[in-house]
Amino acid sequence: MQQVLADLTASQWLQLRAVEIVLEEATAECAGEDPLRPVHRGDLEKAKQTLLDLQTYLREYDDSFEFTEPDPDEVEATRKLLLRS
């Protein structure tokens, strides 16, 4: 069960980080203005904290559990998806 949770948590982390990276780019293009409404920024931050809490929990069972960064292809796919909206 922990392995399934670890796999799902790692996958969600990659997706969240790809969104953050694209939003950072959009913020830079908008003269530093956050493209997210405050409520949505708060939701993103809560989701990130939940994943970090899960990481702490999972490390109790596997101390080598680490999050990785999304690869450029994942970021590009996210960029296309978000900018299409």
Image: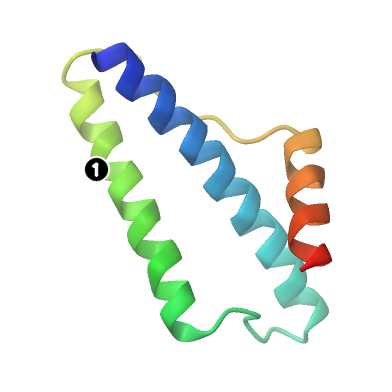
Q: In this image, 66 relative to 61: left or right?
A: right
Mark 1 lies on residue: 53
Residue pictured at 81% horizontal, 35% vertical? 73
Image quadrant where residue 9 sits = top left
Task: Tell which of 55 and 47 is nearer to you.
Answer: 47
Image quarter where the N terminus lies is: top left
- What colouring method underlies this structural image? rainbow
| x and y, in percent, of residue 68 in the image | 54, 30
Q: Quadrant of residue 70?
A: top right
State how many labels appear. 1
Q: Residue 48, image x and y in percent? A: 39, 53
| Residue drawn at 26 percent across, 36 percent down | 54
Residue 26 appears in the figure: yes
Point 48% across, 39% down: residue: 13
Task: Name the quarter where the C terminus is drawn.
Answer: bottom right
The answer, for residue 67, to whether it is visible in the render is no
| Residue 76 position in % (x across, y down) | 82, 45
Residue at x 24%, y 43% (from the top left corner): 53
Which of 2/31 is in front?
2
Q: Is residue 76 left or right of residue 39?
A: right
Identity of the amino acid at label 1? Asp
Task: Check disc 1: other Cα within 10 Å, few if <14, some if 14-19, many if 20+.
Answer: few
Q: Mark 1: which secondary structure?
A: helix
